[in-house]
Image (cartoon, rainbow, N blue to C red):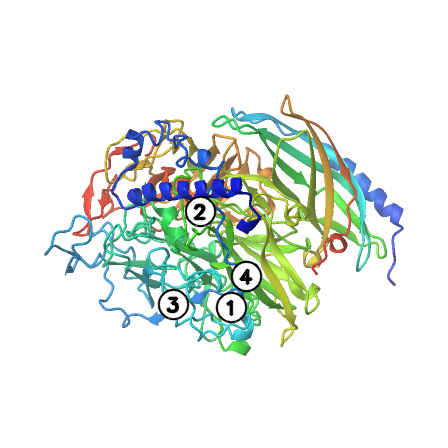
């Protein structure tokens, strides 16, 4: 908004809004730096006993909205004259893979590496001369890598978490002409647009400290050791006003032991690393196709063939992502840049469209015969991470945790670039779309209403492709893989990806607009309308031989697996806390009621469910309010959706595969079924509106009867720089076992 | 030799199939405190999608399930959850007699207002193997009326589809 068009009264209101933003930012900074607690805010009357921010001018999101703008409540992000669709979209930055053993020093260990190091006294609670372990993983047998001997890492990937810096090693994995002409040897400065300020290292914390976002490449049967080094500031106050320097990385939604799952209470400190072991196995590998004889259960071999692996090929997954899961700080840390994507390749989903062996589905990707790569070709297989952001009057990233209903930005980024363009050829492309926002839902369409083919949901290829002109709403953390055929366009044409989901607040979408409405410019939400421009630039050099088969991956047949019990989880407001444990409890208005008990705020030392190893259950997820929506994520095992609002026919076609995140819809409920197998430990279930999650809509469930070393219930880790300590759980709900 | 079925015969067969599909119940209300009302309606939908490779005559009943939900926490205006099911709409190519089917439905969130005009696109494509890859867009416009005082659905009408590629050019 150009300020010279504003009246003096409007200018005054914007000044007030900016002052209010600064007031809140100071309190947010103090809270994020651990100088005050949420309980202090209650005590001081800044938030009510019911968990609402008091309607104090300049503090409450409801009070401030009169002075700011929709949706941030703060002044509009200054654009410095930048126009949409004037910068190319950078494709993801592919992380280097190294053979293991031999790459990592020190070598990875089954149990956490407790070799001592001298600690930096700037760390909280550390005195000069204190020492602590080099690895932040909780020590001992319970947090040892499960099946490490049989699933030894073959690939090592090392990343850091650190403040913003220039990328001089960008690897998009494709030639420049398939990346909108970007020269990868040019330095990638960390800004959202070349016309916007470079971000301060304390404001943006990304993987390796750089953009574009990082892409991990893996294949079944080739375990990865993902060593994550925490290089964030030792001093907790050096956070640019928001974000926490302790982190826990969740591989969403890996089928592996809980020690690798990024448990919210298993975080690690600056100066430490954490070894995450991603075995990349098919679910059921201990009970189905254990000899690995089914060719559909396989991994792409380097010679173009298939290496067969154990497990159920119906459980093959394709599109994951990884992000921070730090207790009470997930939204801030992910918003600051702690998010990447993970493409997993398999016999079925090879990433090589010219391999025609009767197993490969030949989805749009690229030709092995051209690239020399028998798998993982990215030429026509493009990752998109959508996220709304806001920046302050200095152009630096801005976040407001006072939005306990969900923080919304007023600018859309794709792969952390403000409204970019992407050059495409006249052929089919696969897009792996991640909603990487804090609280914003998307609903995507093409500006001309042209059909798209949805092939996967949450990383799982659907039983059959679904042709749509508008995708379903896409909640936070949901991944939709779609195919767009650009051959219908002429060279020189443009078409835009548009967002139809209009928000007024972070509670839920206010309305789903039509394409004409969203293009009209009449919405008060600046993030509806065009978000990504496709420029059709040429014919492909080779004919498009990629396919979208009418059958992709049928669901696993669970009919012969008995359901041992059902559980009900109800998500809503006005939760209560049952513990004063200062390390493990969260406060906030949000919570989860389990099996018709009280609605409880998060405590990662409370066990809310403990399903038996090797069984199957049915879970009912219910939204108890009409003013909200919650995208609920269940860790560890992909589930099948049995019903919405009690009926199977209410499940949309694009949800009839496997999933791990469900938008409950206002006052809606979802019935799912899932198994508990192969691995054990403590996992989570939570709202992936990460503001809701951080304000206590999270619970711990665990598989603790797999046999030694697991005990019932599992001890709760309490990380400290000097080493992780363990406590007995505060509570096990009576219905948990 | 390629034969063409008369258009009226195809339309008649579509009608028979559609009327057969009408047999069925309506969705029950959900027993949650924040739900004000729910219901189901079927709206006759007919029209022609123009454009290449041929015009397609569409006919059928669109089923719309609606749930009006309230916000007891903050008493903000009610929301309508719409589930629009196009699966009983079918089409026929006006040159070739090719049968067309639709891809199902749309789930929408809309604020509760007395009269809500909902424009929604959906995909149509030739029936049979691989037809989905030759999908084309169609547009339906529904006028849904609510009794705002009782927060309940009152009536609905639909207008004919139009060729979206004509009305919303790429550039």
* Residue B155 falls left or right of residue A647: right
**Circle 2 sits on which residue?**
A438
- Seen in the picture, residue A664 relative to A386 is either above or below; the reply is above
Q: Residues within 10 Å of mark 3 (few under 14, many from 20)?
A: some
- Percent of width and height locating residue A583: 24, 40
- Percent of width and height locating residue A635: 39, 47
**Circle 1 sits on which residue?**
A378
Q: Are marks 2 and 4 in contact (CB under 8 Å)?
A: no
First in residue order: circle 2 vs circle 3: 3
Measure the alpha-carbon separation of dots 2 and 4: 20 Å
Measure the alpha-carbon separation of dots 3 and 4: 19 Å
Circle 2 sits in a helix, a strand or a loop, which is it? loop
Give the foreground label among 1 and 2. 2
Q: Are marks 1 and 4 on the same chain?
A: yes
**Circle 3 sits on which residue?**
A166
Give the foreground label among 1 and 3. 3
Residue at horizontal 73%, vertical 41%?
Answer: B141
First in residue order: circle 1 vs circle 2: 1
- Please report, as a chain letter, where disc 1 is located: A
């Amino acid at each position: 908004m150009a300020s010279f068009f504003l009246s003096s009264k409007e200018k005054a209101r914007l000044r007030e809004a900016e002052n209010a933003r600064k007031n809140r930012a100071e309190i947010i900074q103090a809270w994020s730096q651990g100088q005050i607690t949420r309980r202090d805010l209650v005590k001081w009357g800044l938030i009510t006993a019911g968990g609402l921010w008091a309607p104090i001018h300049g503090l409450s999101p409801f009070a401030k909205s009169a002075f700011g703008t929709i949706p941030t409540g703060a002044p509009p992000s200054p654009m410095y004259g930048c126009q949409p669709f004037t910068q190319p979209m950078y494709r993801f930055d592919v992380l280097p893979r190294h053979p293991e053993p031999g790459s990592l020093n020190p070598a990875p260990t089954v149990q956490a590496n407790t070799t001592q190091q001298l600690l930096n006294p700037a760390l909280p609670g550390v005195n000069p001369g204190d020492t602590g372990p080099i690895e932040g993983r909780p020590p001992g047998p319970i947090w040892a890598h499960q099946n490490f001997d049989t699933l030894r890492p073959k690939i090592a990937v090392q990343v850091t978490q650190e403040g913003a810096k220039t990328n001089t090693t960008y690897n998009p994995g494709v030639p420049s002409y398939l990346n909108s002409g970007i020269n990868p040897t040019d330095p990638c400065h960390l800004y959202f647009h070349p016309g916007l300020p470079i971000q301060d290292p304390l404001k943006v914390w990304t993987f390796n400290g750089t953009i574009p976002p990082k892409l991990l490449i893996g294949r079944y049967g080739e375990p990865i050791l993902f060593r994550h080094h925490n290089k964030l500031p030792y001093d907790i106050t050096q956070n640019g006003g928001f974000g926490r320097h302790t982190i826990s990385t969740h591989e969403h939604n890996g089928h592996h032991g809980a020690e690798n799952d990024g448990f919210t209470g298993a975080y690690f400190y600056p100066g430490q690393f954490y070894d995450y072991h991603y075995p990349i196995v098919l679910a059921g590998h201990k009970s189905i196709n254990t000899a690995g004889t089914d060719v559909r259960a396989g991994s792409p071999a380097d010679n173009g063939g298939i290496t067969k692996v154990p497990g159920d090929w119906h459980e093959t997954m394709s599109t994951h992502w990884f992000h921070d899961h730090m207790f009470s700080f997930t939204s801030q840390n992910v918003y600051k840049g702690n998010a990447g994507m993970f493409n997993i390749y398999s016999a079925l989903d090879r990433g090589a469209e010219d391999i025609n062996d009767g197993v490969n589905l030949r989805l749009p990707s690229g030709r092995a015969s051209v690239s020399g790569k028998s798998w993982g070709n990215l030429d026509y297989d493009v990752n998109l991470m959508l996220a709304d952001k806001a920046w302050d009057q200095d152009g630096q990233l801005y976040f407001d945790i006072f939005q306990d209903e969900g923080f919304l930005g007023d600018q859309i980024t794709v792969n952390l670039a403000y409204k970019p363009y992407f050059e495409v050829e006249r052929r089919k492309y696969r897009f792996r779309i991640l909603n990487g926002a804090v609280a914003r839902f998307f609903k995507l369409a093409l500006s001309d209403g042209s059909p798209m083919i949805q092939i996967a949901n949450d990383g799982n290829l659907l039983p059959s492709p679904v042709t749509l002109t508008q995708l379903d709403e896409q909640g936070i953390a949901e991944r939709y893989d779609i195919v767009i055929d650009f051959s219908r366009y002429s060279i020189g044409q443009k078409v835009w990806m548009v967002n139809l989901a209009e928000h007024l607040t972070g509670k839920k979408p206010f309305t789903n607009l039509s394409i004409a409405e969203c293009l009209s410019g009449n919405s008060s939400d600046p993030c509806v309308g065009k978000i990504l421009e496709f420029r059709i630039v040429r014919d492909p050099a080779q004919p498009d031989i990629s396919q979208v088969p009418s059958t992709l991956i049928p669901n696993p047949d669970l009919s012969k697996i008995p359901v041992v019990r059902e559980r009900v989880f109800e998500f809503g407001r006005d939760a209560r806390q049952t513990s004063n444990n200062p390390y493990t409890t969260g406060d906030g208005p949000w919570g989860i009621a389990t099996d018709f008990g009280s609605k409880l705020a998060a405590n990662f030392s409370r066990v809310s469910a403990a399903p038996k190893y090797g069984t199957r259950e049915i879970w009912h997820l219910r939204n108890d309010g009409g003013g909200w929506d919650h995208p609920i994520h269940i860790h560890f095992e992909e589930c099948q959706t049995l019903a919405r609002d009690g009926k199977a026919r209410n499940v949309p076609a694009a949800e009839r595969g496997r999933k791990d995140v469900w938008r409950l819809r206002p006052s809606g409920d979802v019935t799912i079924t899932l198994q508990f197998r192969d691995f054990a430990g403590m996992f989570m279930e939570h709202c992936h509106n990460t503001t809701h999650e951080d304000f206590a809509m999270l619970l711990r469930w665990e598989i603790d009867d797999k046999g030694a070393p697991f005990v019932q219930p599992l001890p709760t880790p309490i990380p400290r720089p000097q080493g992780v300590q363990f406590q007995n759980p505060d509570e096990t709900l009576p219905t948990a076992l | 030799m390629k034969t063409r079925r008369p258009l009226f015969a195809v339309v008649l067969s579509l009608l028979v199939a559609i009327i057969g599909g009408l047999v069925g119940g309506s969705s029950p209300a959900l027993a949650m405190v924040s739900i004000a009302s729910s219901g189901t309606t079927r709206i006759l939908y007919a029209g022609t999608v123009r454009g290449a490779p041929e015009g397609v005559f569409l006919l059928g009943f669109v089923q719309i399930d609606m749930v009006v939900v309230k916000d007891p926490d903050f008493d903000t205006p009610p929301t309508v959850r719409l589930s629009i099911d196009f699966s009983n709409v079918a089409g026929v190519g006006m040159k070739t007699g090719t049968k067309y089917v639709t891809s199902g439905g749309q789930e929408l969130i809309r604020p509760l207002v007395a009269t809500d005009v909902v424009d929604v696109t959906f995909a149509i494509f030739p029936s049979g193997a691989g037809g989905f890859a030759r999908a084309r867009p169609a547009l339906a416009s529904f006028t849904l009326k609510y009794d705002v005082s009782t927060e309940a659905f009152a009536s609905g009408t639909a207008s004919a589809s139009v060729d979206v590629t004509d009305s919303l050019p790429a550039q």
